[in-house]
Amino acid sequence: MSQQISPFRSSQELEETFALVQQRIAQKLLDYKAYDFSKKQTCAFNVFFDLAQEFDALEDLLTLAVLIIRSMFDVHAEIYVLNSRSVLLRYGCSTGASCAIPVMNTEGLPLTDGPFWQDKRYCIPIRGKKIDQDLLPITPVGETLGLLVLHPEPDITEKDAFFFEKYANRVGYQLHNRMLAFKHREHLEFIKNLVHDIGHNVIVPNMYFKLLFRQLDGKMKAMRHAISDLMETSISSPTLAQLDYIQHRMDEQYNEVFRHFQQTSLFLETLLRQSHFEKGRYVLHKSVVNLNDRIITPQLERFKARFDEKDIKLIPYCEGSGTFDDSILVTADVGLVSQVLANLFSNAVKYTRPTPHDEAAPNGEKSGKYLCYGVTLLPDHFGKGCCGARVNVITSGPYINAEDAPQLFKADFRGRDVGSEYGTGHGLFFAKEISRLHGGDAGYEAHPMGNCFYFTLPCDDSVPKSS
């Protein structure tokens, strides 16, 4: 049995990568033959790359760059780096910490036109990478991050100038990576502090609301009993009937607000879980739960009013949707999987359309807007004796464009038939990622009724509960 080389790329993508890298190696060998660098120049590259791994601070890297030039070629050098306002500041000097070389006037220098002479100094723009420029802590000018300034005596040959230009390029790549790493560390530190602030200022106060809801529920029950006693012992009156009506309406609104609070709290506490930020990935808190009671029913109740508003009829099961077995147990992170189903229901609210006249509506119904849901049991789906549960959400309407279908679960992708509906293209990507973390998957299929979106989960405790 052949083994998959990479879990991230297909065989075709790996073949293309292999061919490209092989081509670049061959081209680079030809380039270096044409460069014809001296042994000392080649050694300078090697020393720079080796020692660049030893120094973490930006100033150390820049000092290394100028001291290699001074030590190996007896040429004094300076390095200027742009700041956030695109102003060049001197960061490195080969004459020592105090730097005996006067600071150069850097205003108006041509940083995008290649090497140039300025006041007997040979200036080489230091270029970074084209990617991730928006993440750097400075504002590049074109691709230029700074300036390598040489003080050759009396002059510099064309061959040496070419070498120093290539040397500046290598300094630029290292400088770009070092700046990016610094920005990432700063970003991670901010996230770390933000998570603590969220826990202190959002999660903990939100838990206090649960106590307030319990207290309010107790008071409303007491009022309910008091009104009930009055109606049994008192003569019926319009005022008492109105009070009873108000009480029932308050109960309905309380239950609706409480359900909304429960789901919002679940998503809030799950998505802002501190371990996600500490690990840099979603960390699952799995347990064996009833799929219907803990995941499907709460989301149906949450979205019922939105489905009604859009005239979308809910059907517990139809052909191809599976059954509606309320005893299926799955191993899942309730909060994250509930968010997966919520994303599918949210898309259904936006994109469900009437069944086309030449298509069959479910259960013999007349043409209209329908959402059919159900669960399909998949024996041995996760290995022998380990079954899976596939949750299907089928919506009426025209089929999704055939060219768009394979792209639906990619990050930030939005199909061409979304119309004016708001969306970010993240919901289905999230659904697939969370399903995969559970060992399952998420996908799309065309269905006689319209479009079927689904995700799979392991049943019972067929996969380890730890993540």
Image: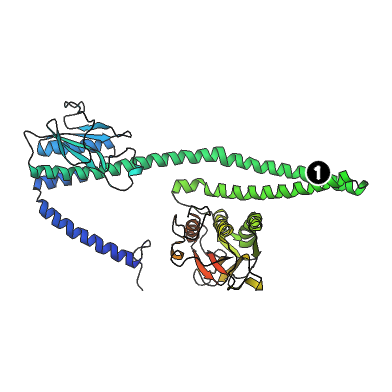
Extreme-right residue of the structure: 235
Element class at badge 1:
helix
Pinpoint residue 340: horizontal percent, then vertical percent: 54, 57
Q: Quadrant of residue 5?
A: bottom left
Q: Nearer the viewer, residue 275 or 268?
A: 268
Tag count in the figure? Answer: 1
State left or right for residue 373 relative to residue 33: right
Whether residue 106 is situated above or below residue 47 in the rendered picture = above
> In the picture, which quadrant includes the N terminus?
bottom left
**At which x and y percent is residue 172?**
24, 43
Left/right placement of residue 115 relative to residue 15 reads left
Is residue 53 visible to us here?
no
Q: How is the image coloured?
A: rainbow
Residues 412 and 430: in front is: 412
| Residue position for label 1 | 223
Q: Residue 381 placed where, x, y %? A: 51, 70
Q: Residue at x 77, y 42 (%)?
A: 219
* Residue 411 visible in the snapshot: yes
- Please tell me whether residue 373 is drawn above or below residue 168 in the rendered image: below
Residue name at image x 52 percent, y 67 percent? 399
Q: Nearer the viewer, residue 205 or 425?
A: 425
Q: Amino acid at mark 1?
A: Met
Task: Name which residue lies at 55% across and 55% down.
Answer: 339
Q: Is residue 184 above or below residue 425?
A: above
> Residue 245 at x, y = what percent?
81, 48
Q: Residues within 10 Å of mark 1 (few under 14, many from 20)?
A: some
Residue at horizontal 88 percent and vertical 46 percent from the top = 238
Give the camera-side residue of 198 and 314: 314
Q: Please state if 443 lies on the left or on the right of 302 as rendered.
A: left
